Amino acid sequence: MRPNARRTTLADIAQAAGVSVATVSKVVNGRGDVAPHTRVRVQELLHRHDYLAPVFRHTEAVENPTIEVQFKGSLKSYVAETLEGIVDAAAESGASVVVSKASSAPHWARDLVSAGRRAVIAVTSVHTAAHLKELARSGLPLVVLDPLHLPDSRVHSVGATNFAGGLSATRHLLSLGHRRIAYLGGPATAVCNQARMHGYRAAMEAEGATVPEAYVRPGEFMYETGLAGAAELLDLDEPPTAVFAGNDEIALGVVEAARARGLRVPEDLSVVGFDDTSLAQMASPPLTTVRQPLREMGAAALRTALRLANGEKAESHHIELATELVVRASTAPPPEGG
Amino acid sequence: MRPNARRTTLADIAQAAGVSVATVSKVVNGRGDVAPHTRVRVQELLHRHDYLAPVFRHTEAVENPTIEVQFKGSLKSYVAETLEGIVDAAAESGASVVVSKASSAPHWARDLVSAGRRAVIAVTSVHTAAHLKELARSGLPLVVLDPLHLPDSRVHSVGATNFAGGLSATRHLLSLGHRRIAYLGGPATAVCNQARMHGYRAAMEAEGATVPEAYVRPGEFMYETGLAGAAELLDLDEPPTAVFAGNDEIALGVVEAARARGLRVPEDLSVVGFDDTSLAQMASPPLTTVRQPLREMGAAALRTALRLANGEKAESHHIELATELVVRASTAPPPEGG
DNA sequence: CTGAAAGCGCTTACAG
DNA sequence: CTGAAAGCGCTTACAG
């Protein structure tokens, strides 16, 4: 959008289309008494000239833009803490944050534009290729938080150093003396999960520790994955003495699976999570975990979205914030003879 | 707002004020060249006649209203799950939900009106008397979720049957054979906490169980209250065999305090929470707790807000949804000789 | 400090 | 199906 350009008026469009202002007005208001080919031509020009009806012009107020945050499924801790970072950063810049579940209605992106949204932030990629096409057509910028797929040059994204996090979690367990360490992860297709797992593998290989096939299990980023996965791991002939979980929810499932069969954490089994949501601090025992700076990631996404909404360029298509190991009470040296 | 009334125009105001349309226009646009007494009189009429500038008239589109949800402090599970209910209900009605932290800027309520908000939902009352006055002046309806204070006739609120919840939690412990039951609650001034505590007291009295003074402790609705409170309870000469916690976070603190001193839950100590946030399901052991229908409460608040935004009357100033005891693994009969 | 007048962007009833 | 013309709500440069 050219900053100094005068707003496009119906008269501009009328002149460009070679019709009267009255006809353009009818097209804008969706009246029926316009010839189809005239309508199409005028619509095309309206779109090209970025015409905005007076009632929507307030949405141009760049000082107080509205950003839409979309999430999928339920608003769990991970999403909530990221959202808090977004809301705080928005308050600082005078932006408003609308929260919604991802939609797949036919013209969702254009509807967002009409509703005055200036950018979309998706918490964990909720968008398919069709979504992206619709979005590109609408001209609405998108920032993905913790993308599930490989960065696409059409979208901007904010993530964390997942590989380094997997590395440090595993090194921590190795340094405590564990050698039989399993990885219970999220979806095999999610890049953040892949990076965490490869960090784990890299640390194991560097130490010369073997990774039996049965020790690495993908799943969902959910409690149930930890509960069921840990039960199977603990049934192995050579069960692990430590489990690195792909996120805190999985870790909580592992802790409960251990408790349910009379094993104590960390005395009998060490568990490391990932994310450091409030769940990790309030667990019993409090979880050793890899902290993702969720609030900061949310704030970074909001600032990127604002920059793009303003027509400025973002520094980079993808930025990653540093993860950090937080040692609490769910890890200890392996049991004797373990 | 009279439904069939034509929109107030500058001409209406000009006539009422006995000045020209030009002068009214200057007042609306905040120009300096208007005599102070003229300005005041015109402003007063603009407000009385509910004048809305053209750029903001789109906010009148009652089909797609925007509701502001304000919370205080951090966006914890309780708030997140309520918010999810609000967002889902909004999606059904075509409303948009803006999320923010409670503000105390001088004209926050009027600013919300200018930004097009049609109602405010506060998750746990965040408003002081000064807030309420500013709000009343702005004409923006307010719905409070889980009010901390006694219902005020100026605000609408949605809560849960806290007394009945406290009663059923305590009866559950009594029925397991516990007699030494403590209550670790939230702020003494919060009505929801008072109701839960009186439910507890009523159940204890009905059973003829004594409640030593040291067994009832107010605090904050936070993990730390459970951690510290349980430590003190367990140091008593006659420690309780069960703790009813004012919410799930407090309960998690109790579970951890027990674990830290080598006690098992539920074998050595039973714990009941309140809320049934996702925390309760993922705890180890999974928590017995009193479920508040948080999503439904959010949805009810949204629908009330929408009705008020439409100028309709709500059924009642305060509605309460039913709580329900959810028995999981953190409660069991008291230990032998307990 | 006020307002008559010109003008802008838009809509609509109506003639063709 | 099109557009000239009247009209609406608002703003602003300017005369008093």
Image (cartoon, coloured by chain):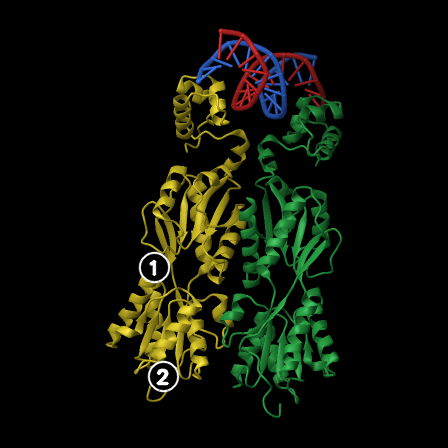
Chain colours: A green, B yellow, C blue, D red
The residue at 48%/77% (across/down) is B285
Please state which of residues A124 and A17 is positioned toward the viewer in this rendering: A124
The percent position of residue A125, horizontal first and vertical second, equals: 66, 57
The percent position of residue A62, horizontal first and vertical second, equals: 61, 39
Mark 1 — residue? Answer: B190
Quick one: label 1 or label 2, which is nearer the N terminus? 1
> Can you see residue B42?
yes
Q: What chain letter is assigned to the residue under label 2?
A: B
Mark 2 — residue? Answer: B334
- Residue A295 is labelled as none
Please state which of residues B256 and A323 is positioned toward the viewer in this rendering: A323
In the figure, is residue B16 to the left or right of A241?
left
| Mark 2 Cα-neighbour bin, 10 Å: few <14, some 14–19, many ≥20 | many
In the figure, is residue A281 to the left or right of A233?
left
The residue type indicated by label 2 comes to Pro
The correct choice, above or below, for A257 with respect to A118 in the image is: below
In terms of secondary structure, where does tag 2 sit?
loop
Q: Quadrant of residue B207?
A: bottom left
